[in-house]
Image (cartoon, helix red, strand yellow):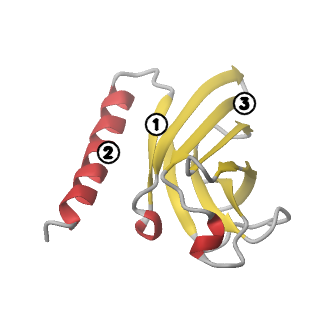
Amino acid sequence: MSLARPNNYRVYFATVLTLFLCACGGTDEYIIIGTARMVSAEGQIRLSKIDEDARRINLELERLPPPSSLQPEFQRYTAWFVDAAGRATKAGDMTYDPSLRQASLVTTAPMDSFTLKVTAEETIEASLPSQFVVARQSIPE
């Protein structure tokens, strides 16, 4: 039972912090935490408005093992924008540093409200997210 406490605490803290920042209005930072498949992963999403139709996304994740250690065929971590209807758009392949166990991506969001999902993928040609989701965070308008 004591092993579950740190993970529950992290989830609770991340949720409270995200809600607090949203309540303050005008926040442009979110905490992203790992899914059950990757409980050690955590990071930040920074948003900045470029214009009426786009926001710049800076995504950083820490405590990620090499993708191939999850399953031998996985070669990379990829970020996806998922809209309210469940349609996924590839945000980009993350740059992974194995010595730091960190991945990052700077991209542009084509929508205001979405869920940012990070998956482990086999190839750079992935056009749909795999079922191996390592982190996710909902981004409201």
Residue labelled with disc 3: 54
CA separation in Å, label 2 and label 3: 25 Å
Where in the figure is residue 14, as x and y percent of width and height?
Answer: 33, 44
Q: Quadrant of the N terminus?
A: bottom left
Q: Nearer the viewer, mark 2 or mark 3?
A: 2
Mark 1 lies on residue: 30
- Answer left or right for 112 relative to 34: right
Question: According to the image, label 2 marks what residue?
Answer: 15
Residue 85 visible in the snapshot: no
Give the class, few, some or many, for how many residues have Cα within 10 Å of label 3's Cα (few <14, many ≥20): some
Question: Which residue is nearer to you in this view: 38 or 15?
Answer: 38
**Quadrant position of the C terminus in the picture:** top right
- What kind of residue is marked 2? Thr
Mark 1 crowdedness (10 Å alpha carbons): few <14, some 14-19, many ≥20: many
Q: Report whether 139 appears left or right of 123.
A: left
Q: What residue is rendered at 26% in x and 43% in y?
A: 13
- N-terminal label among 2 and 3: 2
Circle 3 SS class? strand
The answer for how far apart the CA atoms under marks 1 and 3 are is 17 Å
Residue drawn at (60%, 50%) of the image: 99
Residue 41 in picture, x, y percent from top left: 46, 54
In front of the other: 64 or 92: 64
Give neighbour class at mark 2: few <14, some 14-19, many 20+ (Cα, 10 Å). Answer: some
Residue nearest the observer in this picture, 3 or 88: 3
The reply to whether residue 80 is in sight is yes
Where is residue 112 drawn, in percent x and y? 62, 37
Residue at far left of view: 1
